[in-house]
Image (cartoon, helix red, strand yellow):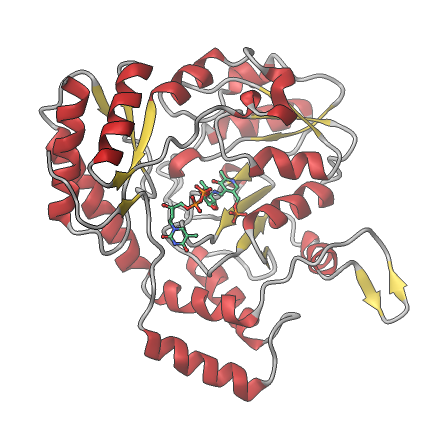
Amino acid sequence: MRLFDKPILVTRPYFPPIDEFRAGCEEIWENQWLTNNGPMVQRFHSRLAEYLGVPDTNIALFVNGTVSLEAAYQIMGLGGGDVITTPFTFVATSHALRRVGATPVFADINPDTMCLDPDSVEKLVTRRTKAIVPVHVYGGMCDTEAFAALSRKYGIPIIYDAAHAFGVLNAKTNTSGGVGPEWGDVSMFSFHPTKLFHSCEGGLLVFRDPSLQQKLFDLRNFAIKSETECEDVGMNGKMNELQALMGCLCLDRIDELLDARRRIYEAYAEEFAARPSAITLVPHSSNKAYVPVLFDSAATRERVYNGLKECNVHPRRYFYPTLTDFAPYCYGRGTCPVADDIASRVLTLPTYHGLPLDDVRAIARNVVELACS
Ligand code: T4K
């Protein structure tokens, strides 16, 4: 077992060269503009639209992913209704629902993709259902065709929590965050620094209907229309200029960031190739945002998790426990056995730009040794 001198964390943010950040700051200082849709935010907005291949009328930037989800839920009018979603996610997916007055109803996940299972969802649709919120877990795409069919059948919108899915190519349509039916009515991408692409903090909504854009712009700016008019209960959801600068610099290197994750994933895959049946590397995401590994039992997962920490390697049990084990959502406890089972056996291993491949291989060998001990 390799012991590491310095802690290896599950992830590390990417830091662009500081000279480039300094040069961008000089521009911001020159502009004397810090927030409220400044020039750097507008530049980041345009560049993102270009990168994603969508009209710039179909996106809106926010201060973080959670707030942008709240804005999407509010604009789609989900308050007061039920929304069917997954318990196998970060708490933000459901917290944002509760914060707009909607009730999360938990359906189970598909054991292979770990994403919301459309059949399980359909069994829970009622007259109170106002939307479905699937999550592209770890950047692996949901069964988007099945959700599009449910949307048509029941006349309810699909809002994807695509927090992990920046840079993902939809294998069927070859689109990366587009506005076709495969991306639902709205998709939310998180630009938190723990993500492969970031803007310090940030969130992006991509939506099919361009008429939502002005409403979202208004909502993120307190829903004030003028000095004397306020037309809704708005929020302060604005991204600032420093965030946008960081986002632009990271976008300059998006191919390099994606490549780094792919190389790390491949190194793990090679080490696990002759793996014992106790370890399964989850394969389905094209952006390799995470390195999730599924073990044969909860006991093996805990042994590997604790053993790695003793070697100064700090993986995370994303997403354990499932949301239905948390106090605000415990009314759903026990209703999603597949999600509970996966959550008890999964571990996400370290991956980030700059993590040496030699360390990756050593971590993988430690995992094998611990899993089989
Ligand atoms: N939907 C989904 C499916 C999500 O996964 C998330 C966020 C959201 C919605 C909400 O999007 P945002 O509002 O966050 O944009 C982290 C992130 O804070 C969170 O953004 C992310 N999902 C979640 C999966 O992971 P924690 O509590 O695990 O973060 P933390 O502070 O323990 O950091 C993780 C590791 O990264 C640590 O080992 C330390 C390291 N780290 C972290 C930061 C912030 C650094 O080395 N440097 C840093 O600056 O939640």
Question: Which residue is depicted at the point 40% across and 50% down?
Answer: 194
Say which quadrant the N terminus sits in: top left
Residue 195 placed where, x, y %? 40, 49
Residue 368 placed where, x, y %? 14, 26
- Quarter of the image where one finds residue 15: bottom left
Residue 91 placed where, x, y %? 55, 34
Asked if residue 274 is positioned above or below residue 240 in the image, the reply reads above
Residue closer to the observer: 346 or 257 = 346
Q: Would you say 244 lies left or right of 236 here?
A: left
Residue 40 placed where, x, y %? 53, 74
Residue closer to the observer: 81 or 141 = 81
Q: Would you say 263 lies left or right of 289 here?
A: left
Identity of the residue furthest to the right in this view? 228
Question: Which residue is depicted at the point 15% across and 45% down?
Answer: 359
Q: Quadrant of ligand 1?
A: top left
Question: Which residue is depicted at the point 23% across and 34% down?
Answer: 310
The answer to whether one can see residue 35 in this image is yes
- Quarter of the image where one finds residue 227: bottom right
Residue closer to the observer: 37 or 13 = 13
The answer to whether one can see residue 159 in this image is no
